[in-house]
Image: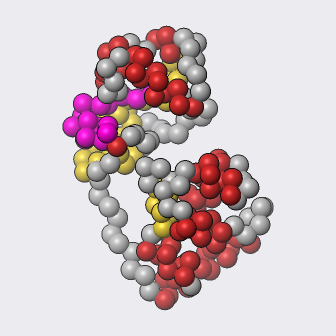
Amino acid sequence: MQFTADVHDAVARGVVNLTFRRWSRPQAKVGGRYRVGAVDVEVDDIDVVPWSSVTAREARRCGFVDREALRKIAAHSGPIDDDTMLYRIEFHTVGAHVAPAPVVVTPDRIAATVQKLDGIDRRSKHGAWTRTVLRLIGERPGTVSTELADLCDRPRPEFKADVRKLKALGLTESLEVGYRLTALGQAITRA
């Protein structure tokens, strides 16, 4: 779950512990842990509710002064009227984000990862894509996924699924907006 940087401190202090999202499908799950700034949060409950049921108290729990301020932010993906259904996500802070141990980039690690990328490209129904996506992310760190997907001529949800495969290999990491290459990802693009 992503939040604007100005909310990170309030999430870390537990002041913000609720959010509403206008998703077409769930982007979080109960029990899931997500990084928000310097902390991790865990989702306690997810419901789908109409905008008309959102209270002023809930807007304040989201970090907004009133419902209208919340509506303006939540409406970034489309207008919200009383009947608009939103995901209502309750969460709590579970502590400081613990970064994974840094990956040691060795020639053997690079070779093994290149083999995995070759396998992904061979099995892909839309052709070899891994090097193209790595190169784009390397050239355009912090670029919104919609723009990167357009450059690859891929639908955004499919593009994001591809990037998750690269992330699972330790090649990319998500930013507040967009992605960047890890040290291993940079080594692979140079290799």
The answer to whether 86 is drawn above or below residue 156 in the figure is above
> Which residue is painted at 48% across and 67% down in the image?
181
82 or 141, which lies in front? Answer: 141
Residue 99 falls left or right of residue 19: left
> Which residue is painted at 44% across and 86% down in the image?
106
> Which residue is painted at 56% across and 57% down in the image?
164
Horizontal and vertical percent position of residue 84: 57, 17
30 or 93, which lies in front? Answer: 93
Is the N terminus in the top left, top right, bottom left or bottom right quadrant? top left
Is the C terminus in the top left, top right, bottom left or bottom right quadrant? bottom right
Numbered disc total: 0
The answer to whether 82 is drawn above or below residue 190 in the figure is above
Q: Which residues are magenta?
A: 6-20
Residue 42 visible from this viewpoint: yes
Horizontal and vertical percent position of residue 170: 48, 68
Horizontal and vertical percent position of residue 116: 61, 75
Q: Residue 66's image quarter?
A: top left
The answer to whether 190 is drawn above or below residue 143 in the figure is below
